[in-house]
Structures are given as C-alpha cells and as structure tokens.
C-alpha cells in the first residue's frame, strides 16, 4: 500500500508541475503572440508612412509640373499680347489712316490657353499664385473679347475710333505689366522647398 501512496503523491507532484509548465508555456506563447502583433503593427505603420510620403512627393511633382506648364504657356501668351499692343498702338497713332475691322482682324492672334483650360480644376492648389494666374488668363480673355468686338461688332466697321483702338492697346500692355510681376514667381517656385 505504501507503494500506491507514494505513486499517488508522485502523480500529484508531476500533475502540479505539469500545470505550472503548461502555464509557463501559455505565458511564453502569449508573449510571442504579443510581440508578433506589435511587430506587425509597427510594419503596417511604417508602410502607411511610406505610402503617405510617396503620395506627398507625387502631389508635389504634379504641382510643380502644373506650375511649369502654366509658366510655359504664359511665356508664350505674354509676348503675343505685347505684339497685339504694338500693332494696335501703331494703328491708333496713325491719325490720317482710317482703322477698319479688317485691320483689327490682322492683329496677332491671341491663342486659346490649352494648359489652363485643361488644368483649371487644380489652379487653386497654387494658392495666391493660382489667383494671379487666373487673373492673367481672365485679362487675356477680355482682350480677345475686345478685339473680337472691334473686328466684328463695332457699329461703324470701316471707321473704328483711334481712341478706342488705343484703349484696347493699353489694356494689352496692362496685361503684360501684370504678368511681368507674376511670371518670375511662377516659373522659379520650387514646391519641394
């Protein structure tokens, strides 16, 4: 009987030790699961940061491309506006010449802005520069409209007033002066700084 009591005590001892070992193994497994979750969370956070930084760089590149494209287009429009000014100013200074609508039609053609019209929905991203760009394009559109009215709808198409032609010429010059102050800011802006 004594052997049975001893083996029962031995059995209880190993059973208690097995519970302790199982508890320790459960704690180790829990710690490993916690570390794995923590490592995964850190990796996910780092991946999100990398994605956000990549998106910001992409947005900055797009904004820089927009700025450069608009600057290129404006650098083409402004000299044409200066040419229109010179042409109209020369006409208005010839007092002995009768200015006709056909003469107005021969003035340099103001191009339709392709970049501006295609990217108008993004202009606000340029902030104050965007507002200045919109002002220039609206002024250019106003000049195109004035020339069109002089050429097609003036009440006496074969005798357009020298004073009115001079006013349109000065309007074109004002556009050039305004653009002169805006263009250096647009083409030299580095959005990554």
Image: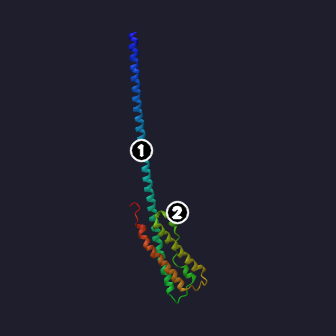
Residue placed at 46% from the left, 59% from the top? 62
Query: Relative to the observer, which residue lies in front, 65 or 11?
Result: 11
In three-dimensional space, the C-alpha distance between marks 2 and 1, rounded to whole angstroms, equals 36 Å
Residue placed at 52% from the left, 65% from the top? 120
- Residue 121: numbered disc: 2
Query: Relative to the observer, which residue lies in front, 179 or 35?
Result: 35
Please name which of the two marks, 2 or 1, marks the residue nearer to the observer.
1
**Please, is residue 58 above or below residue 170 in the view?**
above
Task: Check if mark 2's residue and mark 1's residue have beta carbons within 8 Å.
Answer: no
What is the quadrant of the N terminus in the image?
A: top left
Q: Where is residue 23 in the image (x, y as percent from the top left)?
A: 41, 28
Query: Relative to the observer, which residue lies in front, 150 or 3?
Result: 3
Q: In which quarter of the image is residue 104?
A: bottom right
Q: Where is residue 64 in the image (x, y as percent from the top left)?
A: 44, 62
**Please, is residue 109 above or below residue 3 in the view?**
below
Q: Quadrant of residue 22?
A: top left
Q: Position of residue 9 (x, y in %)?
A: 39, 16
On screen, residue 123 versus residue 18, left or right, reads: right
Judging by the rendered image, the residue that carries numbered circle 1 is 43
Residue placed at 38% from the left, 10% from the top? 2
Near mark 1 (Cα within 10 A), the count class, few <14, some 14-19 or many ≥20, is few
Classify mark 1: helix, strand or loop.
helix
Near mark 2 (Cα within 10 A), the count class, few <14, some 14-19 or many ≥20, is few
* Label total for image: 2
Residue placed at 42% from the left, 34% from the top? 30
What is the quadrant of the C terminus in the image?
A: bottom left
Q: Which of the two discs, 2 and 1, labels the residue nearer the N terminus?
A: 1
- Residue 161: numbered disc: none
Query: Relative to the observer, which residue lies in front, 176 or 48?
Result: 48
Classify mark 2: helix, strand or loop.
helix
Outermost residue on the bottom side: it is: 96
């Amino acid at each position: 009987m004594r052997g049975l009591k001893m083996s029962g005590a031995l059995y209880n001892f190993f059973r208690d030790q097995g519970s302790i070992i199982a508890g320790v193994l459960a704690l180790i497994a829990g710690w490993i699961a916690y570390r794995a979750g923590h490592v995964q969370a850190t990796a996910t956070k780092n991946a999100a940061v990398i994605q956000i930084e990549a998106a910001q760089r992409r947005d900055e590149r797009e904004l820089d491309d927009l700025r450069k494209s608009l600057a290129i287009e404006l650098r083409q429009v402004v000299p044409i506006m200066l040419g229109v000014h010179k042409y109209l100013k020369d006409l208005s200074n010839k007092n002995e010449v009768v200015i006709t609508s056909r003469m107005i039609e021969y003035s340099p053609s103001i191009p339709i802005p392709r970049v501006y019209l295609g990217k108008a929905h993004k202009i606000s991203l340029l902030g104050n520069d965007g507002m200045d760009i919109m002002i220039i394009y609206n002024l250019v559109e106003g000049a195109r409209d004035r020339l069109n009215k002089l050429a097609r709808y003036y009440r006496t198409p074969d005798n357009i007033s020298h004073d009115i032609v001079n006013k349109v010429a000065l309007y074109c010059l004002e556009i050039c002066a305004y653009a002169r102050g805006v263009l250096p800011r647009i083409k030299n802006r580095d959005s990554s700084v």
